[in-house]
Amino acid sequence: MGYLLFIFYLLLFCWLLGKIKFVVNAGLSKKIIVILFLTKVSAGLFAGWLYQFYPNADTWLYHSDALKEYQLLFINPKEYFTNLFISNYGDDYSGVFKSTGSYWNDLKTNLMVKMVSVFHILSGGRYYINVVIYNFLIFLGNIALFKVFKQVYKNHTNILVITCFLLPSFIFFGSTIHKEGLIIAALGTSIYCIYNTLHYSGLTFRWVFFIICSLGFIFLLRNFVFMAFIPGAIAWVIAEKTTFRPLVVFSVVYGLLIILFFTIGKVIPVLNLPQAVVEKQEAFKGLEKANTAVEMGTLHPTFRSFVANTPRAIVNSLLRPFITDGKLLRFLYLFAFEILLYELIFLVFLFFKRDDSMIFSNSFVVFGLFFSFSLLLMIGYTTSVLGAIVRYKSIYLPFIITPLLYYISWEKLVLTLRIKK
């Protein structure tokens, strides 16, 4: 029965993707769309199979906890539909930015469990069928992101298919039943709506509704992504609506953001953002020692401490895992080679950049770079486990790798290689 249900959902969703106007209008053939969807499903299936050998893998913990919720639906429907809104800390719903011991911190996991419990209703509690359902839902977000990239990076569809769907860590973690795929989908939705607002229809109720819903969802799942997105979006809009160069606009906005980050807590104590980052780092350090734990400097809620910890944060989040980190966990070798590939791409970009390349002249490209690097810095400050670092940063890679590949003069590279031969 399970195999038949799996095949049924797989065929159903492949058929639906060929019928949904939003997907069909992405500029990809139906054949390519189905292949990309099946590739995502395959990655999700492989990840599920692999993670079953890791007893504390979140994706399987969501599955087992959701089975209890699924059973609760039939035993006590009232509790099933209301327990998501009940705090385990009495009447205390404070601590929005706390990393431990708050309703909002627990809500991230509770939302995942509740979502998977709904999948269980459709799949009869079967993990691998849930993978198919989950990837169908988030695939629409991937398509939204691709459609924006296609407007910005014109005539480079092959590159965009790779960077929006097939980057190794991006597809692996973005297809696993976890927060990453949902955040990709929500980011894709919000970016698509903002882009259309700026370039086509203007501000409409429909776009505002989808932007609020998608950003609200991101805030509930991972509030620091929301906090990084807002200034990036503001700078993007200003750059589009003024004659100032995008790099100037973003530099000013992010400069003001840094000042606000370190001073707002003095005026509104509940918004002591540096302390929230410090507590997030402490919460990570307080977890059971992982095989892939890395050294981190002790962070304090001061400007000087953040500056002192910046080099190590950049190395940990942007350049690791190293090949030598594979000794800690063989699983990391794949992602270490992926990082080496990106470093090679960056070197090729430096030496074979297009003559007309103005990577900082497009406001969306600059948005993607500032947004991604600010999040990579946050990951480096707070996360002490390489496995988590690789997963967290995977969903921001398209914003970094796409402009590098787009602005490389491939003709110049090929010509140089031929001359050397």
Image (cartoon, rainbow, N blue to C red):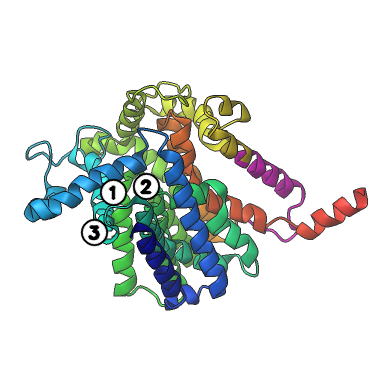
Q: Which mark is residue 178?
A: 2
Q: Is residue 351 magenta?
A: yes
Q: Residue at x 49, y 76 (%)?
A: 24
Q: From this viewpoint, is residue 189 visible?
A: no
Q: Is the Cβ of the residue at disc 2 closer than 8 Å to that at disc 1? A: yes
User: What separation in Å lies between label 2 and label 1 (alpha carbons)?
Assistant: 7 Å
Q: Is residue 289 above or below residue 344?
A: above
Query: Where does residue 158 sit, x and y in percent of width and height?
Result: 64, 64
- Label 2 vs 3, first from the N-terminus: 3
User: What separation in Å lies between label 2 and label 3 (alpha carbons)?
Assistant: 18 Å
User: What separation in Å lies between label 1 and label 3 (alpha carbons)?
Assistant: 15 Å
Residue topped by disc 3: 121
Magenta stretch secondary structure, dominant: helix
Q: Under tag 2, what secondary structure?
A: loop
- Label 1 vs 3, first from the N-terminus: 1
Q: Under tag 1, what secondary structure?
A: helix
Query: Where does residue 184 sit, x and y in percent of width and height?
Result: 42, 55
Task: Name the image quarter holding residue 281.
Answer: top left
What span is colored magenta in the figure?
338-359
Q: Residue at x 67, y 45 (%)?
A: 346
- The quadrant of the rendering that contains the N terminus is bottom left
Question: 308 and 217: which one is in front?
Answer: 217
Residue topped by disc 1: 112
Residue sitting farthest toward the front:
1
Query: Is disc 1 surrounded by few (<14), some (14 to 19) or many (20+) residues within 10 Å?
Result: many
Could you tell whether 338 is left or right of 265 in the image?
right
Query: Where does residue 138 sit, x and y in percent of width and height?
Result: 40, 60
Q: Is residue 236 magenta?
A: no
Could you tell whether 294 is left or right of 288 in the image?
right
Residue type, label 2: His
Closer to us: mark 2 or mark 3? 3
Q: Is the Cβ of the residue at disc 1 closer than 8 Å to that at disc 3? A: no
